[in-house]
Amino acid sequence: MVYAGAYAGWHAWIDRRLAVVETCGAIVAGVVLVAMMLLVSADAILRHAFSAPLTFQLTLTESYLLVAMAMLALPWGYRKGGTIQVRLLLDACPRAFNNVVIRIALLSASAYLAALAWFGWRRFHEAFVEGHVTMGVIDWPVDWSWVWVPIGCGLLSLRVLLDAVAPVLRPIGSDHEGEIEPAEPL
């Protein structure tokens, strides 16, 4: 039983540190959202009032800021309960069966997200090494539009994996000890 306690301690230690990184990502995503709103508003005002649009705004917003905002907020959103759950069958099945099904589903999702992070990293690296650009009024480097995909998917993959191997399953979206459902340990 000492092993189970030590494992739970390590799990909690990793969980706390990952939560800090996820929260930092969510804060950056919020700052990016505000920057996007300011840029789009400024572009609309300048375009309609002075016939002088911000020619860079659309590419910057859609290819860089929007991707950064969405990908950096993903792990925090999952941890806080931003998921869709179909519980019809889960509510009708025994808890022990549900624990196994949920853990398998979480492991599968974690593997898929890790693959997305890996392929996103490869795409970023290729664009970085080869110096890919999107040509326009400004030649935009493609690599910095891809860097957010491996970061966001990688963090989400770690969070989902951590939930899958947790000593006790907890409802998605509860990061408070008091809300953990009793379940069978690993």
Image (tube, helix red, strand yellow):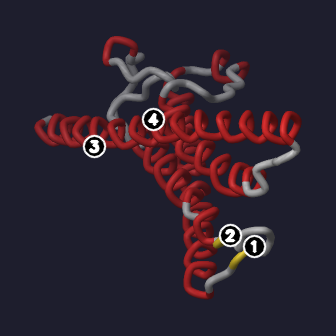
* Residue visible at 53% across and 51% down in the picture: 152
Q: Is residue 88 left or right of residue 108?
A: right
Upstream in sequence: badge 2 or badge 4: 4
Across and down, in percent, residue 118 comes to: 55, 68
Upstream in sequence: badge 4 or badge 3: 3
Classify mark 4: helix, strand or loop: helix
Instruction: Give the residue number, with chain letter if any, for mark 1.
Output: 134
In the image, what residue type sits under mark 2?
Trp
Front residue of 43/30: it is 43
* Residue found at the very far left of the displayed protein: 2
Q: Is residue 69 left or right of residue 88?
A: left
* Residue visible at 20% across and 37% down in the picture: 4
In the image, what residue type sits under mark 3?
Ile
Q: Quadrant of residue 102?
A: top right
Instruction: Give the residue number, with chain letter if any, for mark 3.
Output: 14
In the image, what residue type sits under mark 1?
Thr
Across and down, in percent, residue 24 comes to: 39, 39
The label nearer to you, 1 versus 3, is 1
In the image, what residue type sits under mark 4?
Ile
Q: Is residue 16 above or below residue 55?
A: above
Upstream in sequence: badge 1 or badge 3: 3
Upstream in sequence: badge 1 or badge 2: 1
Q: Are marks 4 and 1 in contact (CB under 8 Å)?
A: no
Across and down, in percent, residue 5 comes to: 16, 34
* Residue visible at 71% across and 25% down in the picture: 86
